[in-house]
Amino acid sequence: MSFSNLHLMRETREAISPHWGLSVFVTFIFVLILGVPSSFQIEIGELIPFLLTGPLSLGFSIYALTIVRGDDPHFEQLFQGFQHFFKSFLAYFCMSVLIVFGFVLLIIPGIYISLALSMTFYIMADRPELSFSQCLNESWTLTKGYRLKYLGLGLRFIPWYFLGLLCFGVGVLLVIPWSIATGARFYEELKRIKANEQ
């Protein structure tokens, strides 16, 4: 049972359209929190994003899932990941180590691992009772047979990111929430397929 990436993108754009203003604001705060420390001393600049990326990514995933499920998103959802700080941090840490190790092994393994673990934060947002290792394992299992398809989805957004950069970079603030929410819809499709196979 397959689905169209282009269709997912269009459906997500329709779902997010009533929330563009809020989504741009959420994205701006997300980028600001992770980007500003980089301008400080190198020790601080590297440590703060490393500590905060996991919880904020989990929060953004909660926000994105809310949109694709037709509910009303809230700005505060961006920070709900801090309720599971250690779990989200450990997930991000393990993902980073595995992906970097994969890239050391001639790039392609790094891309493969990144795709295999791409659903981790959506799973964590959807099933907070799972441990970080269970979320990683579930992502690995859920993406089997669909990793190249997810890569294709990511490649479809590259021209949009390029166009966003041409608009003085401001357009990227529109593309980021669209792409993350489309990833959430991709996750929902994988869940549906898995449920039908059982």
Image (spheres, rainbow, N blue to C red):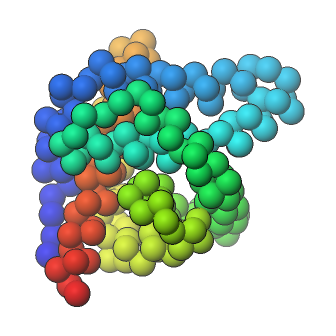
Question: Viewer-proximal residue, 176 or 59?
Answer: 59
From where the camera sits, is residue 164 visible?
A: no
Q: Name which residue lies at 51% across and 68% down.
A: 130
Instruction: Locate the N terminus and report the quarter of the image it occupies.
Output: bottom left
Q: Name which residue lies at 49% across and 66% down.
A: 129
Q: Horizontal and vertical percent for residue 91?
A: 61, 59
Placement of 196 over or under 152, stated as above or below: below
Q: Which residue in the rendered view is the most extreme toward the bottom?
A: 198
Q: Is residue 136 left or right of residue 123?
A: right
Location of residue 131 (image quadrant): bottom right
Location of residue 144 (image quadrant): bottom left
Q: Horizontal and vertical percent for residue 76?
A: 45, 30
Q: Horizontal and vertical percent for residue 68?
A: 23, 45
Question: Viewer-proximal residue, 140 or 87?
Answer: 87
Q: Which residue in the rendered view is the most extreme toward the top?
A: 168
From where the camera sits, is residue 48 visible?
A: yes
Q: Is residue 14 left or right of residue 180?
A: left
Instruction: Locate the C terminus and report the quarter of the image it occupies.
Output: bottom left
Q: Name which residue lies at 27% across and 69% down.
A: 191
Q: Horizontal and vertical percent for residue 28?
A: 47, 21
Q: Is residue 48 left or right of residue 141?
A: right
Placement of 163 over or under 152, stated as above or below: above
